[in-house]
Image (cartoon, grey):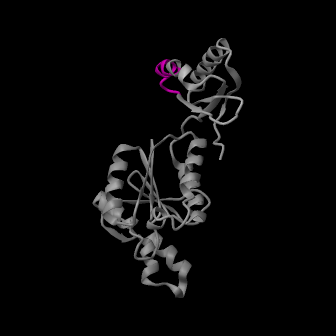
């Protein structure tokens, strides 16, 4: 449903720690949205534009982070214009807001913040005093974490609502090779549920953790009960957690 585009030389060179992606994945997962792809690109207009074109075709929505600002390397909005064949112009509402904010300190560089593609829609949502820039099916967010968090809040508010995701897990003393065939069969029976299996090689009391995630809570509950019976019959069930609203651990 959603693709994520992270933009910035400083990210790819590990000059700064990327925190927006982790926050975004967590908040989207809690709200029930599926992420199709995550891509990271450098501050290059053509590279960014190519990524935008591809991601916007393949996903219902795109959320980008980074490259929105007054300096020479902030080329994300130019890339959006190139991607959708839309020239940039000074948006009157953005220009008015920027002039009001800067007052006598206004510069040509500051006004770059108001240059957006002509097919831009301004979305007023969330706790940020500045509007969210939306171009076609793409939400264009800045990379500065303090502002990004507020604007992402607004994006989630205006996205079409989806059912919450639910989560369940089972811990088993059996090794993955023992039950992999059964998991494959269960996955074919319940394609709407995401089944994960994670081995443990330490001194833990279980050899593997099986996780279930999905928006269809009734199907997830049926699958959970079937797996509980399967591991109980094989005397390998160590513990389990029944379906509940999904919240990532971190």
Across and down, in percent, residue 136 comes to: 38, 53
Is residue 163 on the magenta stretch?
no
In the displayed orientation, state which residue is furthest to the left: 85
* Residue 39 percent across, percent down from the top left: 42, 52
Residue 68 falls left or right of residue 196: left
Position above or below: 237 against 127: above
Q: Where residue 168 sits: x, y (%)?
A: 64, 29
Q: Quadrant of residue 163?
A: top right
Question: Is residue 118 visible to the viewer in this orientation of the structure?
Answer: no
- On the rendered structure, is 213 left or right of 55? right
- Overall secondary structure of the magenta stretch? helix
User: Looking at the rendering, which quadrant does residue 44 occupy?
Assistant: bottom left
Please name the residue shown 53% across and 41% down the image.
33
Looking at the rendering, in which quadrant would you find the N terminus?
Answer: top left
- Front residue of this view, candidates 204 and 108: 204
Q: Identify the image quadrant of residue 200.
A: top right
Q: Tell whether position 191 is magenta.
A: yes
Please tell me whether residue 223 is drawn above or below residue 73 in the rendered image: above
Is residue 211 depicted above or below 6 in this figure? above
- Magenta region: 183-193
């Amino acid at each position: 449903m959603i693709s994520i585009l992270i933009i910035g030389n400083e990210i790819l060179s590990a000059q700064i720690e990327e925190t927006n992606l982790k926050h975004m994945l967590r908040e989207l997962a809690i709200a029930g949205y599926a992420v199709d792809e995550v891509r990271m690109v450098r501050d290059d207009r053509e590279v960014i534009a190519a990524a935008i074109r591809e991601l916007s075709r393949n996903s219902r929505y795109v959320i980008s982070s980074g490259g929105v600002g007054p300096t020479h390397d902030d080329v994300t909005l130019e890339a959006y214009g190139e991607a959708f064949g839309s020239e940039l112009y000074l948006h009157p509402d953005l220009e008015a807001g920027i002039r009001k904010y800067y007052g006598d300190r206004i510069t040509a560089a500051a006004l770059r913040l108001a240059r957006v593609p002509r097919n831009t829609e301004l979305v007023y949502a969330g706790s940020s005093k500045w509007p969210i820039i939306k171009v076609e099916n793409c939400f264009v967010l800045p990379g500065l974490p303090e502002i990004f968090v507020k604007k992402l809040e607004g994006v989630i508010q205006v996205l079409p609502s989806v059912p919450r995701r639910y989560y369940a897990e089972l811990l088993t003393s059996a090794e993955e090779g023992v039950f992999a065939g059964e998991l494959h069969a269960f996955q074919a029976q319940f394609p709407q549920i995401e089944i994960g299996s994670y081995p443990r090689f330490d001194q833990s009391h279980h050899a593997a953790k099986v996780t279930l995630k999905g928006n269809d809570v009734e199907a997830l509950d049926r699958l959970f009960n079937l797996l509980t019976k399967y591991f109980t019959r094989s005397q390998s069930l160590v513990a389990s957690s029944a379906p509940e609203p999904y919240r990532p651990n971190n």
